[in-house]
Image (tube, rainbow, N blue to C red):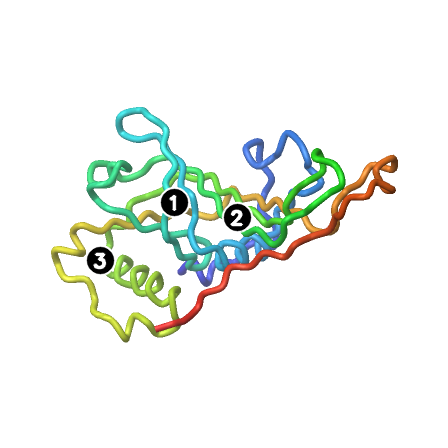
Amino acid sequence: MSALECPHSSQFTQTERTTPKRSRERVTYEREAAYQVLDEALFVDLAFVGPDGAPRVLPTFHVRVGDTLFVHGSTGSSMGLGGRDEFAVSATATIVDGLVFSKSWFHHSMNYRSVVVHANARLVTDEDERWEVFKALINRMAEGRADRSREANPKENAMSALLAIPLEEVSIKQRSGPPVEEPEDEDLPFANGVAPVSTVVAGRL
């Protein structure tokens, strides 16, 4: 059974790692809402401990296929993908929907949607799976783009790595709405409100 066919709950199971220390009212575990953020975000930040024991965070292109997040890397990168098959990661994707301007410094904020994933990532080695995922990565840039560009040659394929990250331990945190104001600040002569933010792709090839 493929990831696309696997039955699952509409909610992720809450865990100790996906339970925030503060602003818990902003956190949910809705699967489809989290998937929407991952599908809309242009990249994810991938955190891991390198082979040398040092922590790293790298921005990387990604695609979601069913209940798995795939990220692209290089076999010669600091991830050390050429030398290990599975390791712990945390991935996050954030979309900023607006800048929130308050009358006080303290209550300035953002309207945002942010997903955090905790998992053990595995290196994708099956050639058929690699081909399907690379095709999905290219088509994510523009529908049908894989058919309008050249496939990787053997040298390029050997230089490229894919990590599969199961979407099981996931949370989504978000803020929306107007600024918060303290009652004593309501009459202050300062402008407040929300400035919308959006990411626009100017063209598709």
Q: Residue at x 61, y 47 (%)?
A: 29
Residue at image mark 2: 94
Q: In this view, does 86 lie above or below 30?
A: above
Q: In this view, does 101 lie above or below 135?
A: above
**Mark 3 or 2: the one toward you:** 2
Residue in front for this viewpoint, 179 or 54: 179
Q: Residues within 10 Å of mark 2 (few under 14, many from 20)?
A: many
Q: Residue at x 38, y 45 (%)?
A: 59
The kind of secondary structure element at disc 1 is: strand
Does the image show residue 4?
A: yes
Q: Report the amino acid beneath label 2.
A: Thr
Residue 127: which numbered mark, if any?
3
Image location of residue 162, percent across then percent down: 29, 50
Q: Are marks 3 and 2 in contact (CB under 8 Å)?
A: no
What is the spatial separation of the Cα atoms under label 2 and label 1, in whole angstroms? 12 Å
Residue at image mark 1: 59
What is the spatial separation of the Cα atoms under label 3 and label 1, in whole angstroms? 25 Å
Q: Report the amino acid beneath label 3.
A: Glu
The kind of secondary structure element at disc 3 is: helix
What is the spatial separation of the Cα atoms under label 3 and label 2, in whole angstroms? 31 Å
Image location of residue 14, percent across then percent down: 60, 39
Image location of residue 176, percent across then percent down: 69, 51
Does the image show residue 9?
A: no
The kind of secondary structure element at disc 2 is: strand
Query: Closer to the N terminus: mark 2 or mark 1?
Result: 1
Q: Quadrant of the N terminus?
A: bottom left
